[in-house]
């Protein structure tokens, strides 16, 4: 893929990933076929800030976990009063990182 | 999520769950129940959808299924999960297989299906309504 397109994609989507993952993605995207560009653009990554807001408001019911696709853990959180409230508070700090991790896994799958 | 991380996480949750149940059992026996720890109930004054699950779980252990139904029906799936899942994971670890890992992701994708997700949500809302009604009864 063209370097300008890759840079534009990374510039637009950098907030969805950990900063240290960006150079790795740049290398991989440069080797990627041009036809996959549209797939990348429409991948629908989850916004870490949105998941934080959801975690603050609905974390007690596991809605944040459902949002990012961790359905199993969402159910566990819902059935345990948000892990007795402790897991809810832990997730306020963890959910942004986990969202970026989920986005990383999604992009990895697209690149394969 | 990698297999090891998931298994470790679930085993930790199961351990925490059992510790919580034992702690509650011990305190209830001495007629000195643990104060409510539900964040939602502390803030809003209303019970959350899963309030009462611990008491329901304890009732199931004692064989009082009727009382467990009245306390919170979600005690049944929680009890089932707490018994089956750790045993399944330990069997997997001993036999060096990943049957639970595969099942977990299959169950997750099943739960994401619209019909199942909406039915589960409707059931949860009805149960929550009942929980609130019972709270003020």
Image (cartoon, helix red, strand yellow):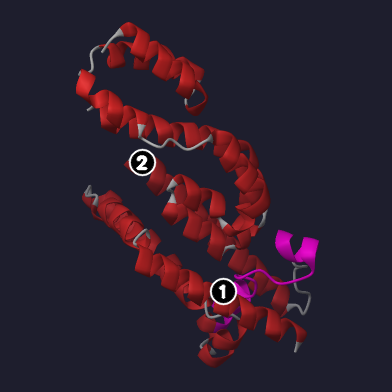
The residue closer to the viewer here, B56 or A105, is: A105
- Residue A101 x, y percent position in the rendering: 44, 32
The residue closer to the viewer here, B113 or A40, is: A40
- Residue A104 x, y percent position in the rendering: 39, 29
User: Is A92 placed above or below A39 here?
Assistant: below
The subunit carrying tag 1 is B
The subunit carrying tag 2 is B
The residue closer to the viewer here, B42 or B113, is: B113
Mark 1, residue position = B125
Same chain for the residues under marks 1 and 2 in the image: yes
User: Is A51 placed above or below B64 here?
Assistant: above
Mark 2, residue position = B4
Label 1 crowding class (10 Å Cα cut-off): few <14, some 14-19, many 20+? few
- Residue B109 x, y percent position in the rendering: 32, 56
User: Is B14 placed above or below B55 here?
Assistant: above
Residue depicted at 56% across the width and 39% down the height? A95
Residue depicted at 52% across the width and 25% down the height? A15
- Residue B7 x, y percent position in the rendering: 38, 48
**Quarter holding residue A91:** top right
Q: In the figure, is residue B71 to the left or right of B43? A: left
Residues rendered magenta in the picture: B38-59
Q: In the figure, is residue A96 to the left or right of A101? A: right
Residue at the top extreme, as displayed: A3
Q: Is residue B55 magenta?
A: yes
**Is disc 1 placed on a helix, strand or loop?**
helix
**Quarter holding residue B25:** bottom right
Instruction: Report whether residue B38 is seen.
Output: no
User: Is A16 placed above or below A1 here?
Assistant: below
Q: CA distance from mark 1 to mark 2?
A: 34 Å
Among numbered discs 1 and 2, the one appearing first in the sequence = 2
Residue depicted at 78% across the width and 65% down the height? B44
């Amino acid at each position: 893929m063209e370097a300008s397109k890759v840079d534009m994609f990374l510039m637009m989507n950098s907030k969805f990933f950990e900063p240290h993952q960006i150079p790795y993605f740049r290398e991989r995207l440069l080797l990627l076929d041009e036809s996959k560009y549209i797939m990348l653009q429409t991948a629908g990554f989850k916004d870490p800030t949105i998941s934080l807001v959801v975690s603050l408001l609905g974390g007690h019911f596991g809605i944040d976990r459902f949002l990012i696709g961790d359905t199993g853990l969402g159910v566990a959180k819902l059935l345990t009063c948000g892990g007795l409230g402790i897991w809810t508070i832990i997730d306020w700090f963890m959910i942004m990182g986990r969202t970026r991790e989920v986005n990383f896994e999604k992009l990895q799958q697209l690149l394969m | 999520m990698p297999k090891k991380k998931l298994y470790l996480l679930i085993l930790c949750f199961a351990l925490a769950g059992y510790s919580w149940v034992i702690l509650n059992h011990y305190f209830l026996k001495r007629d000195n129940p643990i104060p409510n720890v539900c964040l939602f109930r502390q803030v809003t004054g209303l019970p959350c959808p899963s309030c009462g699950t611990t008491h329901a779980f304890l009732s199931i252990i004692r064989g009082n299924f009727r009382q467990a139904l009245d306390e919170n029906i979600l005690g049944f799936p929680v009890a089932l999960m707490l018994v089956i899942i750790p045993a399944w994971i330990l069997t997997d670890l001993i036999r060096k297989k990943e049957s639970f890992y595969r099942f977990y992701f299959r169950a997750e994708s099943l739960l994401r299906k619209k019909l199942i997700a909406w039915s589960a949500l409707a059931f949860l809302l009805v149960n929550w309504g009942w929980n609130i009604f019972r709270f003020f009864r």
